[in-house]
Amino acid sequence: MNDITSATPSLPTMTSRDVEKVQGLEAHLLGIEQVAIQTRHHFHAGLYARTIRIPAGVMITGALIKIPTLLIVSGHVTVFIGGKSIELHGYHIVPGQAGRKQVFLAHADTDLTMTFATQAKTVEEAESEFTDQPTALMSRQQSNDLIITTGE
């Protein structure tokens, strides 16, 4: 079995200073025209997954994440991870720590799926589980989301 740990990117906990940098950028980005991004929510077998597609050329900031999650990236994106950025091209499953607030710049249309184990039964419950700022989420600002619940 190959050990790929050293080659696997990760999303570490960020310092409060780095989170403040992202918040400053976020305040600036809110002053320009926003791109509507649909969120697809899936509940299955005690897992919650939320998927967005960032169009090429678009920069977004994420919520302050308070729990560990997995982030699945498919596309080409640069991610600010606190103190530095990493460029991801292709398909990656990225472990993310609690206490992070990422910036993503899509170089091509890029799909991001964040997933975690939960007992939540609604989008609102799941969102409140992963962030203390659920009302700031794009999924709370628009009504074109897709919700899939398998009942398992």
Image (cartoon, helix red, strand yellow):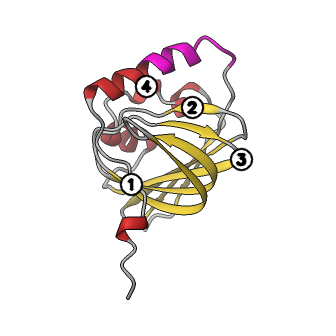
Which quarter of the image is occupied by the C terminus?
bottom left
Residue at image x 37%, y 88%? 1
Query: Which label is found at residue 10?
Result: 1
CA–CA distance between discs 3 and 4?
Answer: 22 Å
Rendering quarter of residue 75: bottom right
Residue stretch rendered in magenta on the structure: 24-33
- Upstream in sequence: badge 2 or badge 3: 2
- Upstream in sequence: badge 3 or badge 1: 1
Residue at image x 51%, y 29%? 140
CA–CA distance between discs 1 and 2?
Answer: 19 Å
| Disc 1, SS | loop
Q: Label 4 is placed on what type of residue?
A: Val
Residue nearer the viewer, 34 or 151: 34
Q: Label 1 is placed on what type of residue?
A: Ser
| Number of the front mark, 2 or 4 | 4
| Disc 3, SS | loop
